[in-house]
Amino acid sequence: MRFLINTAVAGLMVAGLAGCGGQGSAPADSSSSAPAADTSAAAAPAATADSAAPAAAAAAGSAPAEFAQCQACHSTEAGKNLVGPSLAGVYGRKAGSIAGFGYTAAFKKLDLSWDEASLDKWLTNPAAMAPGTMMAFPGIADAARRKAVIDYLKTLK
């Protein structure tokens, strides 16, 4: 029995890692007319300087590209939990408060409500905020991209 449980947990972790992508990476938006961003170190300031587009998308209620990583494990539909809990109404909600969801002991220790500061810290590095969490997500290094996700989370009711 323990073997089956361990195998299932390992499978879920692999699926979560596959869906999370790399640190701060996001799929390219093929509908954009802008040229693809150069990923070299010299182009890094230009890639993060324009934070207006992700923030505008979030403000309009459409998910920013960065949110695709979240959707691998989380639903935006109230009451629909996947590997992770539903993100509907997450902004302002007490962490670990969805009844019936199996939060880890590490996550249950968080004593906070999700606001801009706590979400920013969480999205930067979940494992540092809750050591022992099962969330297989490395975080989003770019502050503008985190803000875009947070702005979008605010729209989920």
Image: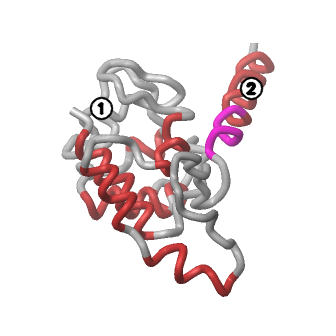
In the image, residue 2 lies at what x, y percent?
75, 19
Image quadrant in which the N terminus is located:
top right
Q: Residue furthest top?
A: 1
| The quadrant where residue 115 appears | bottom left
Most foreground residue, 54 or 1: 54
Residue displayed at 61% across by 57% down: 25
Residue 19 included in the magenta stretch of the image: yes
* Dominant SS in magenta: helix
In the image, residue 140 sits, relative to residue 39, either above or below, namely above
Image quadrant in which the C terminus is located:
top left
In the image, residue 27 lies at what x, y percent?
61, 49
- Badge 1: residue crowd in 10 Å (few <14, some 14–19, many ≥20): many
Residue displayed at 52% across by 41% down: 68
Q: Residue furthest bottom?
A: 42
User: Which amino acid lies under the numbered mark 1 shown in the image of this protein?
Assistant: Ala
Most foreground residue, 97 or 64: 64
User: Which amino acid lies under the numbered mark 2 shown in the image of this protein?
Assistant: Asn
Q: Residue 6 shows which numbered tag?
A: 2
Q: Is residue 147 left or right of residue 104?
A: left
Residue contact between numbered discs 1 and 2, judged by CB atoms under 8 Å: no
Colouring mode (rainbow / by chain / secondary structure / one colour): secondary structure
In the image, residue 132 lies at what x, y percent?
57, 49
Residue displayed at 49% across by 48% down: 65
Q: Is residue 16 left or right of residue 142?
A: right
Query: Disc 1 and disc 2: Cα gap in Å?
Result: 30 Å
Most foreground residue, 79 or 99: 79
What's the magenta region? Answer: 15-20
Secondary-structure class at tag 2? helix
